[in-house]
């Protein structure tokens, strides 16, 4: 018995050394930058090599345990949340690491939860620049009328040459951040990143959270978090949708019909439906009679389309209930009725939601759901059936926290855009597709822009977004064409 144990021990460690060498070389081959996202193709990063060697050693230990289960007592124990590691090669030739718990559960990427604790980030360059794009026509978001999108692009480059991109949404009356403040805070964080010694991704996130108020500066945090995560995904040759769970590489979005005349609404709805959109999100809450007329015109022109309605806090509880009853009389059961009343009118929100449930219509909180405290209140008091999540409102980490709450509570999740380019909606789309947690998706902001500044990225075919196996989010900006923070091109 002792002899058997001795030879088992020797076999494990010989096997470990062999596998470590093999997997280290394999991972190093695929982690060496191969595209424009990682510019220093021949440069080996010592930190990355150490990380890969550590991962390879862990793989070998687990494979040894799998081959010789009787010797598992000789192997180090993992945290309960990661009882074993699985290796899955992507279609792009890279390697995907997936944490698989002992209990049956949804497939969760090794990449984010575990990678953030183990991946060391060494930022060489970080910068924010204005990103201004015109709109096809003026856009109303809440009380804000937009004719131009003035956001902030974030570019982060790691010591291995891999680059990550993020976008800070700037809507002063919605996000409480103007362009000047966004650029200033972005530079503060980028300066911190440039002077910070190598540390884990989670440590960087913790420091950023300490520097920026989660509520006041969520859009800046979101943009920086996007860029860092994108850079890390590029470093390990994994597309973002796989990093966030790998549930699917496609999604279908609804598209917004703004407050316009019934005739214009009918024409625009027909245009969108002919392009392949099956779900229309109509903005309401301003003029009850005109909105009902527009809905009737659209229904007559496109009887097969589905509806979402967003009141943007525009109705009183009585008006919202009247609106629901009118829809019922018209034979319309919307997929969701979003933010029917003022954001702090919790009593009114409950009243509208209770009636909507009788009609089979979920009510979604948007403006009423500004942070994780609001999310918990909504869950604990069963105020609505769904919440609308926007990355600029919560940040990437905040959204991931809400996803965990959703999995425990059964709350319906909706993901929406504001006025982002394909940088912002691309990241949100990867997250939605990879996690598979969002029932309602409205990532249509790029359709409203007069131009597309993003090179590469996801492919849009009508309402369907397709995410390939390119590393990271796959899209980037022509950085040299953007003005610097001082306005000089």
Image (cartoon, rainbow, N blue to C red):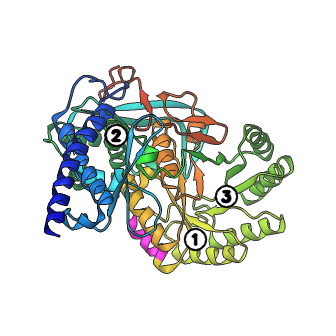
N-terminal of the pair, mark 2 or mark 1, is 2
Provide the secondary structure element on which disc 1 rests.
loop
Q: Is residue 151 above or below residue 74?
A: above
Residue beneath disc 2: 227
Q: Position of residue 132 (x, y in %)?
A: 45, 30
Residue drawn at x 73%, y 68% as measured from the top left: 324
Q: Do the residues labelled 1 and 3 touch (CB within 8 Å)?
A: no
Numbered disc in front, either 3 or 2: 2
Left or right, 355 with respect to 132, comes to: right
| Residue where numbered disc 3 is placed | 309
| Foreground disc of the pair 1, 3 | 1
Check disc 3 and report its element: helix, strand or loop.
Answer: strand
The one nearer the camera, 58 or 186, is 58
Contact (Cβ within 8 Å) of mark 3 with mark 2: no
Q: Is residue 244 above or below residue 150?
A: below
Badge 2 marks a residue whose secondary structure is helix
First to last magenta residue range = 371-379
The quadrant of the image that shows the N terminus is bottom left
247 with respect to 167 (left or right):
right
Q: Would residue 171 be seen by someone viewing this image from the given angle?
A: no
Q: Residue at x 67, y 38 (%)?
A: 462
Label 2 crowding class (10 Å Cα cut-off): few <14, some 14-19, many 20+?
A: many
Residue at 27% in and 67% down: 70
Q: Which of marks 1 and 3 is nearer the N terminus?
A: 3
Magenta region, main secondary structure: helix
Q: Where, quadrant-wise, is the C terminus in this rendering? A: top left
Residue that badge 1 annotates: 385
């Amino acid at each position: 018995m002792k002899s058997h144990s001795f030879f088992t021990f020797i076999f494990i460690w010989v096997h470990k050394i062999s596998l470590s060498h093999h997997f280290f070389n394999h991972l190093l081959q695929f982690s060496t930058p191969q595209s424009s996202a990682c510019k220093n193709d021949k440069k080996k990063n010592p930190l990355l090599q150490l990380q890969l060697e550590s991962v390879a050693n862990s793989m070998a230990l687990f494979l040894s345990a799998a081959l010789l289960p009787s010797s598992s007592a000789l192997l180090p124990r993992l945290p309960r949340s990661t009882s074993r590691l699985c290796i899955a090669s992507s279609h792009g030739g890279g390697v995907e690491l997936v944490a698989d718990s002992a209990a049956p559960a949804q497939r969760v990427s090794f990449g984010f939860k575990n990678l953030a604790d183990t991946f060391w980030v060494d930022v060489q360059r970080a910068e924010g620049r204005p990103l201004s794009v015109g709109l096809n026509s003026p856009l109303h978001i809440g009380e804000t009328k937009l004719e131009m999108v003035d956001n902030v692009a974030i570019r982060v480059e790691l010591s291995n040459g891999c680059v990550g991109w993020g976008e800070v949404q700037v809507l002063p009356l919605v996000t409480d951040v103007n362009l000047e403040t966004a650029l200033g805070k972005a530079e503060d964080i980028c300066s911190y990143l440039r002077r910070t010694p190598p540390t884990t991704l989670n440590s960087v996130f913790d420091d950023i959270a300490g520097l920026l108020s989660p509520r006041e500066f969520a859009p800046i945090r979101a943009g920086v978090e996007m860029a860092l995560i994108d850079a890390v995904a590029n470093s390990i040759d994994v597309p973002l949708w796989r990093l966030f769970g790998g549930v699917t590489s496609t999604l279908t979005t609804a598209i917004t019909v703004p407050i316009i005349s019934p005739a214009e609404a009918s024409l625009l709805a027909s245009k969108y439906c002919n392009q392949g959109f099956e779900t229309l999100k109509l903005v309401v809450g301003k003029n009850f009679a005109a909105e009902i007329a527009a809905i009737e015109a659209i229904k007559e022109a496109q009887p097969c389309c589905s509806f979402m309605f967003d009141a943007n806090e525009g109705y009183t509880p009585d008006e919202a209930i009247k609106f629901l009853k009118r829809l019922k009389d018209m034979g319309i059961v919307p997929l969701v009725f979003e933010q029917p009343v003022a954001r702090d009118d919790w009593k009114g929100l409950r009243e509208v939601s209770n009636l909507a449930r009788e009609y089979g219509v979920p009510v979604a909180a948007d403006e009423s759901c500004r942070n994780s405290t609001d999310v918990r209140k909504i869950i604990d008091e069963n105020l609505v059936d769904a919440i609308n999540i926007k990355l600029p409102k919560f940040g990437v980490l905040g959204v991931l926290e809400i996803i965990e709450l959703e999995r425990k509570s059964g709350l319906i999740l909706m993901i929406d855009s504001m006025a982002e380019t394909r940088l912002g909606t691309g990241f949100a789309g990867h997250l939605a597709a990879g996690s598979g947690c969002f029932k309602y998706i409205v990532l249509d902001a790029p359709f409203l822009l007069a131009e597309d500044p993003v090179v590469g990225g996801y492919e849009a075919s009508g309402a369907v977004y397709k995410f390939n196996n390119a590393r990271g989010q796959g899209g980037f900006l022509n950085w040299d064409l953007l003005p610097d923070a001082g306005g000089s091109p």
